[in-house]
Image (cartoon, helix red, strand yellow):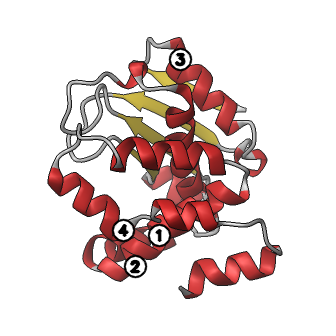
Amino acid sequence: MQVNFHNIESDIIKENFITVFKKYNQLHKYKINVYQKNIGATTMKAQPVISFSNLIRGVKEYKIVVGESLKDTDIKLSSVPSGVLQGWFAHELGHVSDYEQHSNMGMLWYAIKYVISKSFKKKVEHTADYIALKKGFKKQLLKTKRYILLSDIFSEQYLININQYYLSIKDVEDYIEEDEDVTLSKMFHE
């Protein structure tokens, strides 16, 4: 595993990330950098590292940026319950798994579509959740969704965004392990 942590002092964050990452075997061949800093727009985000040398060599590398605190709150990420952190990390690594199928050049178009198309953004966020579910993180994903949606700590706008683009608590509760072809079909045709 090629995971490098940057500016992360909390062993809780590191340990929970590694716990989740271990189940994403197909990603172990890539360099993954996890950074902690104030990101403002969200609590966590996963991105491909697209550099000139990576474009030429075809090397894939990814970064996950985690906030110091939860979006719109003073709650430190390191104080969030482990199950919630694991659900969040499972979702972000679901994104990385989704990115894996695209070339570095293809990721440029992917990023543009994510920004300009609400339906594409919803599909991408649902796909990340479905990948996390397929990896066995249903319990953790439910904890994360309940933590976000059933508490009063997040802004109304953040909750609107979560409800608009991500799987609902009910969708996650209703998820049943299915044949892989059926699940993949659902992910891309809902």
Three-letter code, disc 2:
Phe
Structural distance between the alpha carbons of marks 3 and 2:
33 Å
14 or 78, which lies in front?
Answer: 78
Tell me which residue sits at (52%, 42%) in the image: 143
Of helix, strand and loop, which one carries label 1? helix
Vertical order, 52 against 185 (above or below): above
Three-letter code, disc 1:
Val
Structural distance between the alpha carbons of marks 1 and 3:
28 Å
Q: Residues within 10 Å of mark 2 (few under 14, many from 20)?
A: some
Structural distance between the alpha carbons of marks 4 and 1:
9 Å
Q: Quadrant of the N terminus?
A: top right
Q: Which mark is residue 124?
A: 1
Tell me which residue sits at (57%, 61%) in the image: 172
Of helix, strand and loop, which one carries label 2? helix
Q: Would you name the residue on which mark 4 appears?
A: 165
Structural distance between the alpha carbons of marks 4 and 2:
9 Å
Q: Is residue 109 left or right of residue 26?
A: left
Structural distance between the alpha carbons of marks 3 and 4:
28 Å
Q: Nearer the viewer, mark 4 or mark 2?
A: 4
Tell me which residue sits at (25%, 55%) in the image: 159
Q: Would you name the residue on which mark 2 appears?
A: 120
Q: Earlier in the sequence, mark 4 or mark 1?
A: 1
Q: Position of residue 157 (x, y in %)?
A: 16, 56
Q: Position of residue 74 (x, y in %)?
A: 20, 24
Q: Position of residue 19 (x, y in %)?
A: 68, 30
Q: Nearer the viewer, mark 3 or mark 2?
A: 3
Q: Which mark is residue 12?
A: 3
